[in-house]
Image (cartoon, grey):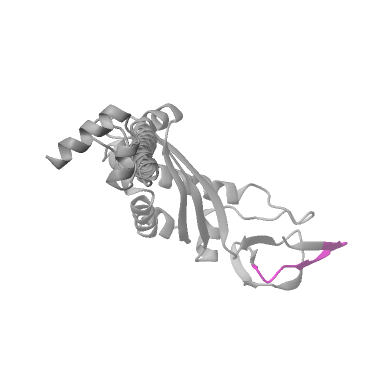
Amino acid sequence: MASIKNLGFLAQLRSDASNHVIRYRSGKVKQSGRGLVFWFRPETASIAELPMDDREMAIFVKGRSQDFQSVAIQGTLTWHVADPELLASRVDFSLGLLTGAYKSEPIQRIETRLAGLVNQAALQYLAQGSVRALLDAGPEPLRHQLEAALANDPALNEIGIAVTAVRLTNLAPSSELERALQTPTFEALQQKADQATFERRALAVEKERAIAENELANRTELARREMLLITQEAENARNRATGLAEAQQVEAGGGGRADPHGRECQGGSGAGADDDLPGPAAGGYARTRRA
């Protein structure tokens, strides 16, 4: 914003390098340029100051898709003055010579015109597709269409305005529709999560069954081996008993022999044996032998 110092019937204007100042006198341009400093007579001069830096304005458009669903667009638009003298002739940028402030609101008027052009192009784009197609495509196609529409718009070229860039940050449906569109995806993801949980549980049950079967097989094998051990021990005990009985029998028959009736016969000569018989029996036994 330019600064003006009033010294009686003269005044001095000092402007920044980013502003273009135009001084009129009697309806004609007497001085025009950026960052000017000059003296002038307030009663005979008219001064306009135009910003030459890039200006940004917010974009918010709410429209309907082809299937009558509400869609909101948010972003920013950057514009600048391409022809300051042409713009000054179409929009009032006059300064108050006592304060140096604008007499009207020229920036707001320009941004209002830009917002109208953006709304028109955006609404036409939204009406051409369904909400699903618009959301799938995203804001990039709309951004290209807005840049092309604003660059070739004669209403901007006629007043000396140029659009530098259009940036869209969001293209979204209403909150209710957004929740409705998110529901199928959420349900599908939930089903996958449940399926994964079921698979983990089934795997855990299968592992537990395998562990139980392994334990049962181990117990069965141990029982079988224990039974074999008991059988072998019993067989060994029987063998030991049989051997012990045979050994005792051998020890008992070591001093003589056993007759068929289980009586032992003492060893010795025949005479000695006969002497042991009673008298008549001995004599009879002797005769029997001689005969």
Question: Residue 102: x percent and y percent?
Answer: 68, 52
Magenta extent: 5-18
Front-lying residue, 196 or 265: 265
Question: Residue 65: within the magenta?
Answer: no
Quadrant showing the C terminus: top left
110 up-or-down from 277: above or below: below
Question: Residue 13: x percent and y percent?
Answer: 76, 66
Task: For residue 196, say whether it is visible.
Answer: no
Quadrant showing the N terminus: bottom right
Question: Residue 13: within the magenta?
Answer: yes
Q: Which residue is painted at 26% across and 40% down in the image?
A: 129
Front-lying residue, 65 or 56: 65
Front-lying residue, 44 or 165: 165
Question: Residue 269: x percent and y percent?
Answer: 30, 48
Q: Disc count in the image?
A: 0
Task: For residue 164, say whether it is visible.
Answer: yes
Question: Residue 37: x percent and y percent?
Answer: 74, 73
- Locate residue 102 relative to residue 135 in the image: left or right: right
In the image, farthest residue toward the right: 8
Q: Which residue is painted at 39% across and 34% down in the image?
A: 201
Q: Which residue is painted at 40% across and 53% down in the image?
A: 155
Classify residue 38 by image quadrant: bottom right
Classify residue 93 by image quadrant: bottom right
